[in-house]
Amino acid sequence: MTASIIAELAGTILAQHERLKRLDQQIQDAFAQHPQAEVIESIPGFGPVLGASLLVAAGDLAAFPTAGHLAAAAGLVPVPNDSRRRVGNLHKPRRYSRPLRHALYLSAQTSMMRQGPNRNYYLKKRAQGRTHSQAVIALARRRIDVLWALLRDNRTWTATPPTRAHAA
């Protein structure tokens, strides 16, 4: 009796695993068709699944006029909570896209695990006394600026920054 139940459960788990593999492949194929997929996927920490979730959460990235607007939509920009007597009091916004923030947070957390400029920035923020979450959020905010610049220039990410072209 138990052997048949175990065999049935194992068959169900294997079928679900195959279904998930097919869905992942469909997501990858659909993401690859997007015109900004190559730029997004070139950034460390973004793969096809996380890149697709970024596009789903943000919608059209060209709809945001600046990187700051995209960061504000993700809730990565502190908002003032001032009154007449208190100024400079900033707090986390209450209205923002949680799926967008989640995608950017996960990509930042993934990117800081490997050696490179993202990890260096994370460690710098930790050395300044920030908590892990604060340092990852600061990294996510910085990566939005990089993402925005890459999409604006329609180029892929490289570890070395580009040189400025001198005007003739």
Image (tube, rainbow, N blue to C red):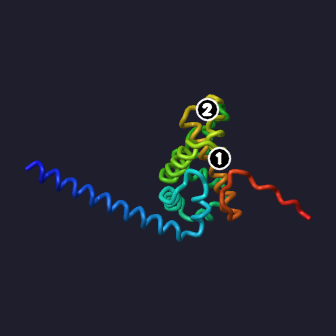
* In-image side of 158 versus 131 (left or right): right
- Is disc 2 in contact with disc 1, using a CB cutoff of under 8 Å? no
Question: Local crowd at mark 2 within 10 Å, few (<14), some, or many (≥20)?
Answer: some
* Badge 2 element: helix
Q: Amino acid at mark 1?
A: Arg
Q: Residue under circle 1?
A: 142
* In-image side of 39 versus 105 (left or right): right
Q: Residue at x 41, y 62 (%)?
A: 24
Question: In terms of sequence position, does the residue under pointer 2 or pointer 1 come before the other?
Answer: 2
* Above or below, 26 relative to 1: below
* In-image side of 147 versus 160 (left or right): left
- Specify whether residue 108 is in view: yes
Q: Residue at x 54, y 59 (%)?
A: 58
User: In the image, which disc is placed on residue 112?
Assistant: none
| Whole-percent x, y for residue 30 in the image | 48, 69
Q: Residue at x 52, y 67 (%)?
A: 32
* Badge 1 element: helix
Q: Amino acid at mark 2?
A: Arg
Looking at the rendered image, the quarter that the C terminus falls into is bottom right
| Whole-percent x, y for residue 41 in the image | 57, 59
| Whole-percent x, y for residue 60 in the image | 57, 65
User: In the image, which disc is placed on residue 126?
Assistant: 2
| Whole-percent x, y for residue 161 in the image | 74, 52
Question: Local crowd at mark 1 within 10 Å, few (<14), some, or many (≥20)?
Answer: some
Foreground residue, 61 or 166? 166
